[in-house]
Image (spheres, rainbow, N blue to C red):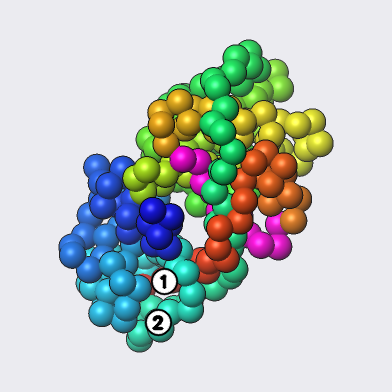
Amino acid sequence: MTDILDNPIWNALMTGNKKFAHGNEYAKYFEREVAIFAGLKSNSETDLHALHSLVPEKSLVVLFTPGEISIPAGWRIELNKEILQMVYQQQGLPLMKDNELVPLIEKDIPAMLELTTLTNPGPFLPRTIEFGNYEGIFNGDKLVAMAGQRMQPDPFTEVSAVCTHPDHTGKGFAARLVRSQIGKISTASRIPFLHVYSDNTAAWKLYEKLGFHTRKQMLVYVLEKED
């Protein structure tokens, strides 16, 4: 079943996130204001040619692949970097009450965009909140930490956008937010997973402590359509 995670974006667009999907039988992509991720059926050059015909010129797309792929003409590689895919392998946590964790809603989008721009946990756009279940911690009226859910390749749900303002690190905010997401995902009878850059040692050590185990080293590609 974990083979589904070898191609998480494609499988998410085929199953749990299909309401956001556009494309054809070779390539699919998310609605552009929700996410810039794209999925390829077999990660082939044929699939990339199909994607090229679907997205607007100068578009950026993000791919997750289980290994190196051949990038044909028409695409410029902005980023090619190792990323760890981690899956939660302990017994699911029950939902826990934490009064400091506040559900984030539409009015919070500017603050979410400001925090993610500062901390860069991954692409976050004006409609990314529509993936659902985002929570945050505030210091007064300022959002200082957040986490939520993103891709849903059945039966998995990705924990995403885990970030803390630099002035508020070391307070355990990320751990509390991720535990809450584990509880929500487990209660929905799904399996939590996430992605983290392999050079982000502090983050993957925290995720290991919380019960995630590295399943596979993946690659993230950021490509720009040139013409």
Query: Which amino acid, mark 1?
Result: Glu
- Disc marking residue 207: none
SS label for mark 2: loop
Q: Nearer the viewer, residue 69 or 76?
A: 69
User: Residue sitting at 71 percent across and 57 percent down?
Assistant: 200
Instruction: Say whether residue 34 is left or right of residue 159.
Output: left
Q: Position of residue 169 (x, y in %)?
A: 78, 37
Query: Which amino acid, mark 2?
Result: Ile
| 82 over 130 or under it: above or below | below
Graded by Cα atoms within 10 Å as few (under 14), some (14 to 19) or many (20 or more), the crowding at tag 2 reads: some
| 149 over 54 or under it: above or below | above
Q: Which residues are magenta?
A: 191-200
| 46 over 192 or under it: above or below | below
Indicate whether residue 199 is drawn in magenta.
Answer: yes
Q: Which numbered disc flags the more N-terminal residue, 1 or 2?
A: 2
User: Residue sitting at 38 percent across and 53 percent down?
Assistant: 1
Q: Position of residue 109 (x, y in %)?
A: 48, 32
Q: Position of residue 63 (x, y in %)?
A: 43, 65
Query: Which residue of the protein is positioned furthest toward the left in this rendering?
Result: 24
Q: Is there any visible trace of residue 109 in the rendered image?
A: no
SS label for mark 1: strand
Q: Position of residue 83 (x, y in %)?
A: 58, 63
Residue 150, image quadrant? top left
- Disc marking residue 71: 2
Quadrant of the drawing holding the C terminus: bottom left
The residue wearing badge 1 is: 224
Main secondary structure along the magenta-highlighted residues: strand
Question: Of tags 1 and 2, which is closer to the observer?
Answer: 2
Instruction: Say whether residue 125 is left or right of residue 32.
Output: right
Instruction: Say whether residue 70 is left or right of residue 134.
Output: left
Give the spatial CA distance, label 1 vs label 2.
Answer: 11 Å
